C-alpha cells in the first residue's frame, strides 16, 4: 500500500518554492550581467584554432616586450598557466 504524502504547512512550502525560484533566477541572470565585459584599456578577443598566447602577444603587443605582454594577459585573465582553447574569450591589454 502506498503512503500518501500530505502538505502540512502550506506557508512554509510557499516560502521554500519562492526561495528556489529566486536562487535559480539569480544563477541564470548574474553571468549575463557581470560576465564577458572587457575592462577599460583591454580588448576582448576570441581564441582561434592554432592560437597560442605567444602568437596572440606577438600580434597585439606593439613595442612592448613579448614576455611582459604575456604576463599582462595572464594577469588580466586570472590565468595560472598558458593554456588557451579554441572559442575561449580573453582580454588583451590595449597598447
Image (cartoon, helix red, strand yellow):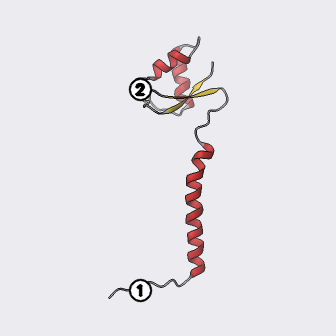
Q: Which mark is residue 67?
A: none
Above or below 91: residue 27: below
Residue 82, position in %: x, y?
Answer: 44, 27
Q: Among all residues in the image, which is located at the extreme left?
A: 1
* Secondary element at tag 2: loop
Residue visible at 49% across and 20% down in the picture: 56
Classify 10 Å Cα crowding around label 1: few (below 14), some (14-19), many (20 and above).
few
Residue 84 can be seen, yes or no: yes
* Secondary element at tag 1: loop
Q: Among all residues in the image, which is located at the extreme bottom?
A: 1
Above or below 14: residue 49: above
Task: Work out whether mark 1 precedes mark 2 in sequence or the reverse, and give the earlier one.
Answer: 1
- Which residue position is annotated with label 2? 49
| Quadrant where the N terminus is found in the figure | bottom left
Residue visible at 56% across and 70% down in the picture: 17
Within the image, what quadrant is residue 23 found in? bottom right
- Which residue position is annotated with label 1? 4
Does the residue at mark 1 contact the one at mark 2 (Cβ under 8 Å)?
no
Residue 5, position in %: x, y?
Answer: 44, 83
Residue visible at 56% across and 16% down in the picture: 61
Residue visible at 48% across and 33% down in the picture: 88
Residue 21, position in %: x, y?
Answer: 57, 64
Q: Is residue 44 left or right of residue 80?
A: right
Q: Among all residues in the image, which is located at the extreme right?
A: 40
Residue closer to the observer: 35 or 69: 35
| Quadrant where the C terminus is found in the figure | top right
Residue 65, position in %: x, y?
Answer: 54, 13
Classify 10 Å Cα crowding around label 2: few (below 14), some (14-19), many (20 and above).
few
Measure the C-alpha gap from mark 1 to mark 2: 57 Å
Residue 67 can be seen, yes or no: no
Amino acid at each position: 500500500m502506498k503512503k500518501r504524502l500530505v502538505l502540512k504547512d502550506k506557508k512554509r512550502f510557499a516560502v521554500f518554492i519562492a526561495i528556489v525560484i529566486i536562487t535559480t533566477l539569480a544563477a541564470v541572470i548574474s553571468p549575463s550581467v557581470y560576465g564577458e565585459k572587457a575592462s577599460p584599456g583591454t580588448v576582448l578577443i576570441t581564441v582561434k584554432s592554432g592560437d597560442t598566447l605567444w602568437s596572440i602577444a606577438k600580434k597585439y603587443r606593439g613595442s612592448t616586450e613579448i614576455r611582459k605582454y604575456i604576463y599582462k594577459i595572464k594577469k588580466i585573465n586570472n590565468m595560472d598557466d598558458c593554456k588557451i582553447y579554441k572559442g575561449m574569450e580573453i582580454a588583451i591589454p590595449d597598447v
